[in-house]
């Protein structure tokens, strides 16, 4: 897909959903966009990774990482998980999508869950600020793509995020982290994204 087409679709999707979902952009930080605005964009962004099919294998396993005991983290995890259910019959680069809720307790347990379930993408929910360093070590060692709806997490090392700028969805890419996780995003995506180097 051409850069201009993707840019128009991002804008149209974001503005359309903002109109359909009043208050979508009113959510308090650190997650400015609701799950139903984030998920379709994140799934589209994954298609711009030149190594995605090799990393994913036979299916796209998405692990939604949340912090137990943190109500915001659990709420966000449930919202993302439920939104992903709506995409159960969709594919990313012709690969079926599977979703998993992952309670973060230790890097060892996270790594075990990733390996046992064949997870190739992690969605990091709010409430994981203290866990970020450990999550990123696991993701980079396992070549797992990290994503989030918390813009600050992208600045701190998560590879892909969705933010908000001038009432429009904003694609955020942390280039060093993406490379460390084995991703190579197409230049057409990077030209329209806010890139952290």
Image: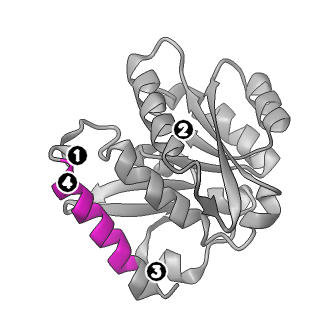
* Front-most of residues 165 and 114: 114
- Percent across and percent down for residue 193 are 43, 70
- Percent across and percent down for residue 22 are 15, 46
Disc 3 to disc 1, C-alpha distance: 26 Å
Quarter location, residue 62: top right
Asked if the residue under mark 2 is in contact with the one under mark 3, i.e. CB atoms within 8 Å, the reply is no
Residue linked to disc 2: 124
The segment highlighted magenta reads 7-21
Labels in figure, total: 4
Asked if the residue under mark 4 is in contact with the one under mark 1, i.e. CB atoms within 8 Å, the reply is no
Residue linked to disc 1: 24
Q: Quick one: SS at disc 4?
A: helix
For this view, does 184 lie left or right of residue 152? right
For residue 108, say whether it is visible: yes
Residue linked to disc 3: 191
Q: Residue at x 73, y 28 (%)?
A: 110
* Front-most of residues 20 and 175: 20
Is residue 48 within the magenta segment? Answer: no
Circle 1 residues within 10 Å: few <14, some 14–19, many ≥20: some
Which quadrant holds the C terminus?
A: bottom right
Q: Residue furthest front?
A: 89
81 shown above or below 176: above
Asked if the residue under mark 1 is in contact with the one under mark 3, i.e. CB atoms within 8 Å, the reply is no
Disc 3 to disc 4, C-alpha distance: 28 Å
- Percent across and percent down for residue 60 are 70, 52
Q: Residue at x 50, y 57 (%)?
A: 42
105 shown above or below 78: above
Q: Quick one: SS at disc 3?
A: helix
Q: Earlier in the sequence, mark 3 or mark 2?
A: 2
Q: Quick one: SS at disc 2?
A: strand
Disc 3 to disc 2, C-alpha distance: 24 Å
């Amino acid at each position: 897909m051409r850069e201009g087409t993707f840019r128009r679709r991002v804008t149209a999707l974001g503005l359309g959903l903002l109109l359909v979902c009043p208050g979508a952009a009113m959510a308090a930080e650190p997650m400015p966009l609701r799950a139903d605005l984030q998920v379709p964009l994140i799934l589209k962004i994954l298609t711009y990774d030149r190594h995605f099919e090799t990393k994913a294998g036979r299916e796209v396993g998405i692990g939604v990482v949340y912090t137990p005991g943190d109500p915001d983290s659990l709420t966000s995890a449930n919202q993302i998980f439920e939104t992903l259910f709506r995409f159960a019959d969709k594919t990313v680069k012709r690969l079926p999508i599977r979703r998993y809720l992952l309670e973060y307790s230790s890097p060892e347990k996270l790594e075990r869950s990733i390996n046992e379930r064949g997870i190739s993408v992690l969605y990091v929910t709010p409430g994981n600020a203290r866990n970020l360093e450990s999550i990123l070590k696991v993701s980079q060692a396992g070549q797992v793509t990290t994503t989030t709806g918390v813009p600050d997490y992208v600045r701190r090392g998560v590879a892909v995020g969705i933010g908000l700028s001038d009432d429009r969805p904003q694609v955020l890419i942390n280039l060093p982290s993406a490379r460390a996780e084995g991703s190579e995003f197409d230049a057409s995506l990077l030209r329209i994204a806010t890139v952290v180097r």
